[in-house]
Amino acid sequence: MPSPRLKLVFLGSGAFGLPTLRALIAKHDIAMVVTQPDRPAGRGGALTPTPIAAEVQANFPHIPLLKPEKINVPEIRDSIRALNADAFVVIAFGQKLGKSLLEGVYAINLHGSILPRWRGAAPINAAILAGDPVVGNSVITLADKMDAGLVLATSSHPLDPAWTTSDLHDILSADGPDLIERVLRDRPAGAAQDESLVTIAPKFAKTDGWVDFTASADECRRRIHGLNPWPGVTVQFRGQPLKLHRAKSLGQSNQQPPGTLIDPAQGIVACANSALQLLEVQPANKRPMPWPDFARGHKPLKDEVLAGRAH
């Protein structure tokens, strides 16, 4: 049965919500889009809109767009509530919605993990870093505690070892439209999360962009993929930074010191009793490139060392 046409408020900031926003605009009446204020970005620090704001401004200028510094101040809260929306859809918004804003409102949130695993700011990174066999989304109700609402719907995918955080972000974000539409249509009762199974996925900082070649090749691959694109894993080669974008864990055993290039033409590096193949790298001030292109230009030698960071 098709969904009734609803009056919605969409609250989101990150690109994760873009597919869902576009789908909702096509099927429902969007009374307002609420996003974070423009922030300085790039080397010049120019004020830059969120991906959600940029999408609305460029393609849907008829939709009212609000960029509050603090969404719960009375005048902002009251202006949103005065819209009398049928539901709020929240995706990667970046501010906590207060009780007085949510009172009496059907509000749902799309989160990029199968809750209660990986509550917090970086669930997609965390799932890859941990090597979770299955990944997915949850649609939940909003609660006082972070990501602790009732689970209304989920999606799931087997985790492909070749996926980076960027890849998985796009895959999970593409699940959003169907999941959110189903919840808006069916309004399921939802299930409480098992608090004993909660894990937390905190934000990453630039200082987290390291890899330790004394770990196994699979741990190194997960770290490279789990931190791509942010903050990115960087090693030193001939005293210069080299960012590692994609890698493959090889089953072969290895006795070389960690970080040693076993096969420079193929980008095979020694890890703890195992070997890692570097597939895509990025030298300083260059574009990302396949390892063979890097090798042709830089001519790495057998037994040269990529210096990671021991932890």
Image (cartoon, rainbow, N blue to C red):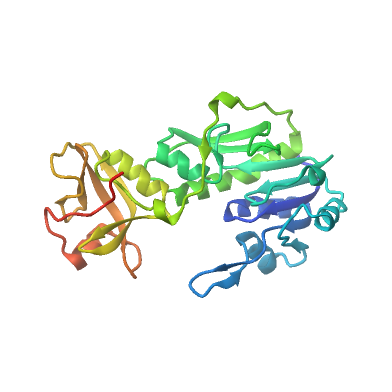
Question: Where does residue 203 sit, x and y in percent of width and height?
Answer: 51, 48
Left or right: 125 with respect to 147?
left
Residue 160 sits in which quadrant?
Answer: top left
Asked if residue 1 shows in the view, the reply is no
Foreground residue, 25 or 197?
197
Left or right: 109 with respect to 289?
right
Question: Where does residue 301 sit, x and y in percent of width and height?
Answer: 12, 58
Q: Which image quadrant: the N terminus?
A: top right
Question: Where does residue 189 sit, x and y in percent of width and height?
Answer: 74, 28
Tell me the residue at 75%/34% (across/down): 186
Tell me the residue at 59%/26% (across/down): 195
Foreground residue, 282 or 75?
75
Left or right: 183 with respect to 5?
left
Looking at the rendered structure, the number of numbered marks drawn on it comes to 0
Q: Which image quadrant: the C terminus?
A: top left
Tell me the residue at 67%/51% (across/down): 95
Tell me the residue at 40%/54% (across/down): 207
Foreground residue, 99 or 107?
99
Residue 67 sits in which quadrant?
Answer: bottom right
Question: Please, is residue 247 above or below residue 46 in the view?
Answer: above
Asked if residue 175 shows in the view, the reply is yes
